[in-house]
């Protein structure tokens, strides 16, 4: 069999992981030289730097002035868990699951918190649940963008303006790449290592006035660990939302977060960040339109994610394989790309259908997506030859 020629171009940055994600263009370690290493995070200057992450984030995202934003432990997972364990139980809750992380929140709510009024509304990978079945009198827990399914909400029309319940939104792969409808949301969470390419372990928790009211008027029946406590003597702990973190943060990571936020401001803020992400999605869509072996996992074009771009393999040779061999073939495609040093960490998530997942967040240059496209065809052709 004739050897398949390798493409003549290569991505300048081969990092397409969906978390931690690519660093901003032009990043060097010199950007972190101002980090307050060896200093207490409670000292005036380090605390001011922590608060800088909060104020810059609120400004870029266009968050309403009466919302509170805090830095919390445990990445996005910690932020979501704080909200679930601190606020749920006051009302019945609807949980929307259409990918692995939403399924994780459902498990916590149903099996660990054991809330009797919990309803799980599910959809398979590539689709969204039937949101008409949500109840505005209930709390609603959902991801805005499915990091492992490549599906996002196209709008927030399904969320009632006059809702009685809270909307708790995991926006970790949506914040800074998509418009978030703040008037329809009450709790929003994300982590530093997604769209702005920050380092891991730190989460962001944004609370609307309605969410704060819940915290100040409702006490869960279960005990709360120290890292989950957001109130003191029945009032919101304001310090958390001014840079007084509950536990010790990495000031090196804090410096990196500030660097990413400054970069976002320099290129034009949220509008520019969204444009970069949408441009990356378009670059993939243009290639998919001509592909004879790949398609989006998202069934509806309007719900395609512009960050976690998930692809399924539709070639006849692949669909004819057993499920076990499909998984092996998809891993081989990703492995071939990694061996060539042109794309790292683009295999689909372990719970998702076998395929590929290309991160298209704002720190990824569209030129790198364009350079990756012929390599995708090359890796597919190589793998197909070995399975036929």
Image (cartoon, rainbow, N blue to C red):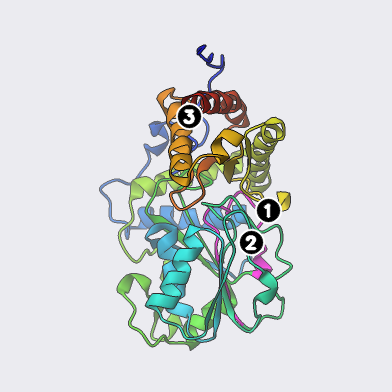
Would you call the spot at circle 3 few (<14 residues within 10 Å), some (14-19), or many (20 or more)? few
Where residue 11 appears, as percent x and y from the top left, is 53, 24
Instruction: Work out which residue is located at the far top of the displayed protein and give it.
Output: 2
* x, y percent for residue 222: 35, 84
Residue occupied by mark 1: 303
Q: Residues within 10 Å of mark 1 (few under 14, many from 20)?
A: some
Look at 60% across and 60% down and name the residue there. 144
Per the model, the C-alpha gap separating discs 2 and 3 is: 33 Å
Q: Main secondary structure of the magenta part?
A: loop
Q: Secondary structure at mark 3?
A: helix
Q: Nearer the viewer, mark 2 or mark 3?
A: 3
Indicate yes or no whether the magenta region holds residue 179: yes
Disc 2 or 3, which lies upstream in sequence?
Answer: 2
Q: Which dot marks residue 128?
A: 2
| Residues at marks 2 and 1 touching, judged by CB atoms closer than 8 Å | yes
Q: In this rendering, which labeled residue sits more in front, label 2 or label 1?
A: 2
Real-space Cα distance between discs 2 and 1? Answer: 8 Å
| Residue on which disc 3 sits | 387
- Taking 347 as reference, is 86 above or below it? below
- Which sits in the foreground, 373 or 127? 127
Residue shown at 42%/35% (left/top)? 31
In this image, 115 relative to 309: left or right? left
Query: Residue 186: where, in percent of width, then height?
Result: 59, 72
Up-down relation of residue 316 to residue 148 (above or below): above
Tell me the SS state at disc 1: helix
Give whichever of discs 2 and 1 has the lower sequence position.
2
Where does the magenta region start and end?
165-184
Query: Mark 1 and mark 3: span between their CA atoms?
Result: 33 Å
Above or below, comparing residue 342 to residue 81 in the picture = above
Q: Is residue 139 left or right of residue 15?
A: right
Residue 282 seen: yes
């Amino acid at each position: 069999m004739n050897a398949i020629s390798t493409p003549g171009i290569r991505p300048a940055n081969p990092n397409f992981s969906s978390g931690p994600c690519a660093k901003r263009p032009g990043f060097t370690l010199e950007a972190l030289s101002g980090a307050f290493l060896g200093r207490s995070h409670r000292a005036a200057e380090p605390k001011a730097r922590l608060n800088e992450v909060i104020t810059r984030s609120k400004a870029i995202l266009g968050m309403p002035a009466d919302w509170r934003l805090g830095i919390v432990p445990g990445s996005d997972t910690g932020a979501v868990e704080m909200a679930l364990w601190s606020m749920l139980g006051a009302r019945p809750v609807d949980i929307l699951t259409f990918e692995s992380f939403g399924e994780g929140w459902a498990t916590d709510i149903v099996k660990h918190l054991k809330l009797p009024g919990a309803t799980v509304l599910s959809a398979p990978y590539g689709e969204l649940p039937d949101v008409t079945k949500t109840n505005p009198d209930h709390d609603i827990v959902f991801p805005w963008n499915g990091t492992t399914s490549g599906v996002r909400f196209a709008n927030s029309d399904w969320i009632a303006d006059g809702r009685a319940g809270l909307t708790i939104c995991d926006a970790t792969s949506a914040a800074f790449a998509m418009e978030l409808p703040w008037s329809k949301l009450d709790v929003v969470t994300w982590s530093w290592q997604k769209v702005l390419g920050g380092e891991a372990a730190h989460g962001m928790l944004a609370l609307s006035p309605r969410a704060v009211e819940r915290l100040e008027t409702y006490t869960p029946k279960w005990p709360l660990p120290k890292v989950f406590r957001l109130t003191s003597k029945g009032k919101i702990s304001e310090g958390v939302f001014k840079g007084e973190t509950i536990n010790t943060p990495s000031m090196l990571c804090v410096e990196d977060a500030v660097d990413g936020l400054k970069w976002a401001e320099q290129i034009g803020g949220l509008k520019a960040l969204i444009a970069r992400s949408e441009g990356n999605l378009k670059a993939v869509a243009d290639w998919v339109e001509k592909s004879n072996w790949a398609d989006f996992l998202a069934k509806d074009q309007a719900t395609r994610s512009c960050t976690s771009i998930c692809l399924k393999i539709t070639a006849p040779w692949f669909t004819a394989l057993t499920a076990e061999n499909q998984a092996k073939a998809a891993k081989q495609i990703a492995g071939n790309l990694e061996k060539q040093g042109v794309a790292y960490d683009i295999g689909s998530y372990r719970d998702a259908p076998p395929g590929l997942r290309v991160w298209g967040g704002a720190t990824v240059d569209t030129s790198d997506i364009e350079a990756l496209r012929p390599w995708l065809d090359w890796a597919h052709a190589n793998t197909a030859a070995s399975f036929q």
